Amino acid sequence: MFETSEFKINEHGIDLKKNYQIYKHIDFREIIQIEIKKGFLVKNWIFSLTIGTLMIIVTSIWCIESINSFDFENLQKSSVRLYLVIHAIPWILLFGSVCLIIVTLKRNLKMIIYYNKTRSWNTLREIEKKGIINELIDFLEKRTKIVVDKKAYVTK
């Protein structure tokens, strides 16, 4: 009925997927509660944000040093490419660390399923793009307890 790359929901329960293969089936009787709220897409976002910030600081210093040590006048013709590649490495790492921070700070709707003293969370990005988030909420309300964070999601 509702299917994404991470889960499949039908009248029998919720099937969790990994690599497009179903690895766990959760029956609606096992579910304690489903929570829909806005949250970070990365599970360990504090760790990723810390690593990204440290990488930006280190690579920024490295980029400044690279600019200061850039010397074209004393180069031999055979080593120009290697010299340019070595001086491009800190800039590539700086760009990568900025991308890491951007991805870490992205937020989207996610569904947290509490069952059998454990929990599982999945993003609702594909459901939201299809525009069937209201149908999903209505479907789940008929079958289990659902908590929707009204600040994160405004019904249309």
Image (cartoon, rainbow, N blue to C red):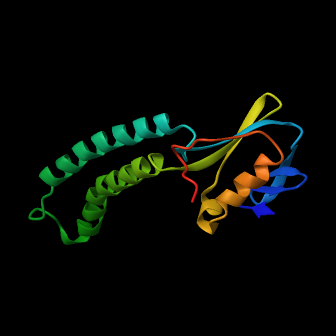
Residue 141 percent coordinates (x, y): 77, 47
Q: Residue at x 40, y 47 (%)?
A: 101
Which quadrant of the figure has residue 9? bottom right
Q: Residue at x 28, y 40 (%)?
A: 57
Q: Is residue 6 visible?
A: no
- Given residues 107 and 143, the one toward you in this image is 143
- Given residues 103 and 72, the one toward you in this image is 103
Q: Please, which residue is most extreme toward the front here?
A: 156
Q: Residue at x 41, y 35 (%)?
A: 50
Q: Is residue 20 visible?
A: yes
The N terminus, quarter of image: bottom right
Residue 94 percent coordinates (x, y): 32, 51
Q: Please, which residue is most extreme toward the left here?
A: 73
On screen, 149 above or below 81? above
Residue 152 percent coordinates (x, y): 52, 46
The C terminus, quarter of image: bottom right
| Numbered-mark total | 0
Residue 128 percent coordinates (x, y): 60, 61
Left-right relation of 35 to 48: right
Left-right relation of 109 to 54: right
Q: Please, which residue is most extreme toward the top here?
A: 117
Q: Please, which residue is most extreme toward the bottom here?
A: 77
Left-right relation of 10 to 77: right
Left-right relation of 28 to 118: right
Q: Residue at x 88, y 55 (%)?
A: 11
